[in-house]
Image (tube, rainbow, N blue to C red):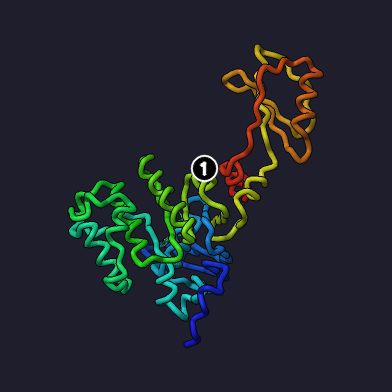
Amino acid sequence: MPAPQNPMETANAIEIRGLAKTYAAAGGNPPKAAVKGLDLTIPAGSIFGLLGPNGAGKSTTINILAGLVRKTAGKVTIWGFDQDVNPRQSRAAIGVMPQELNIDPFLSPRASLEVQAGLYGVPKSERWTDELLELVGLTEQANSYSRHLSGGMKRRLLLAKALVHRPQILVLDEPTAGVDIQLRDMLWRNVRRLNEQGMTIILTTHYLEEAEMMCDRIAIIDRGELILCEDTRTLLGRADSKSLVVDTGSDTTLPALPEGVRAERRADGRLAISYAPSRVTADGLIDMLRAADLPIRDIAVEVPDLEDVFVQLTSRR
Ligand SMILES: Nc1ncnc2c1ncn2[C@@H]1O[C@H](COP(=O)(O)OP(=O)(O)OP(=O)(O)O)[C@@H](O)[C@H]1O
């Protein structure tokens, strides 16, 4: 067996090359190609968002990283360790907070964490159970049956379980689906803190504003294929569209607008003029409104968000 690469040499937390997964035919259903030759590089220290519509292959990819689903083809390197060559080391580098609340109902949170630490071979002297319980706000419930925990508390426990072996990479699969604002805040605070301490974070979420807020880099996949992978800022810049929202007072007649510029009256009476900043400037548009004697009582610029870009990229296919 080749010697494992020194993990400190790797600038990338994860490298995925030509990853494919086809689920076997079952129950009358044909085989399903869920991931089709995916290449993905996740830099160490990043907060990386893996986004895509339903059925894109996000969970399949994450489950392959976690060692829960066996890939059909391709190469996965985690923290410098090839998953096929050094399965133990690559598994030790990653902690996964899954979507499902898979918690033993008869164990207390403390016992769950101890069992998990045992599974990962963490020696007793290196365990940080109390600190973890504190981190996720479960100190008071540490010794109660897990089946008595609320859904939100179970999620907190899942986060703690993902961290018992102090992985370099934390994967969060839809961590905030259906959780309340307090829990979401707790989660994102912890994620930021862990990231500041050097942990690489990978997350999937359907809440695009969360991805926009949290992730420095984003990959969008669709039908098992990579559509793009780039810095969040670059990605947002892709939508060549902004809106000038003008309060023109009462009903006013619109001037003729240049090609590619659209105007619509919103329910609140304001005029929304959308334009491509690469072709038209806000300055030019305002001059045009003034030249047409349109009163400008107030004006605002709306920039596209990740939702706009996401829809543009995934709906044109
Ligand atoms: N165990 C399985 N057997 C057969 N097909 C599967 C299995 N798991 C997933 N699939 C199929 O593979 C495709 C990708 O599913 P996956 O769960 O990876 O997508 P996803 O991007 O996580 O979707 P979502 O956002 O809905 O969670 C889907 O068409 C799904 O139906």
Residue 126 occupies which quadrant of the picture? bottom left
Give 3 or 155, whichever is nearer the viewer.
3
Taking the view exactly as shown, the residue that stands out farthest to the bottom is 1
From the top left corner, tell me how far across and down residue 275 is, in percent: 72, 34
Q: Is residue 100 above or below residue 299?
A: below
> Which residue lies at the image location 31% right of the left edge and 74% below the top edge?
121
> Which residue lies at the image location 40% right of the left edge and 71% below the top edge?
92
Q: Is residue 314 above or below residue 4?
A: above
**Could you tell whether 279 is left or right of 268 in the image?**
right
Taking the view exactly as shown, the residue that stands out farthest to the front is 125
From the top left corner, tell me how far across and down residue 279 is, in percent: 78, 38
From the top left corner, tell me how far across and down residue 241 is, in percent: 68, 38
Give 5 or 124, whichever is nearer the viewer.
124
Residue 257 occupies which quadrant of the picture? top right
Q: Quadrant location of ligand 1?
A: bottom left
Q: Amino acid at mark 1?
A: Glu
Q: Is residue 4 above or below residue 203?
A: below
> Which residue lies at the image location 50% right of the left edge and 86% below the top edge?
2
Q: Is mark 1 within 8 Å of ligand 1?
A: no
Mark 1 lies on residue: 209
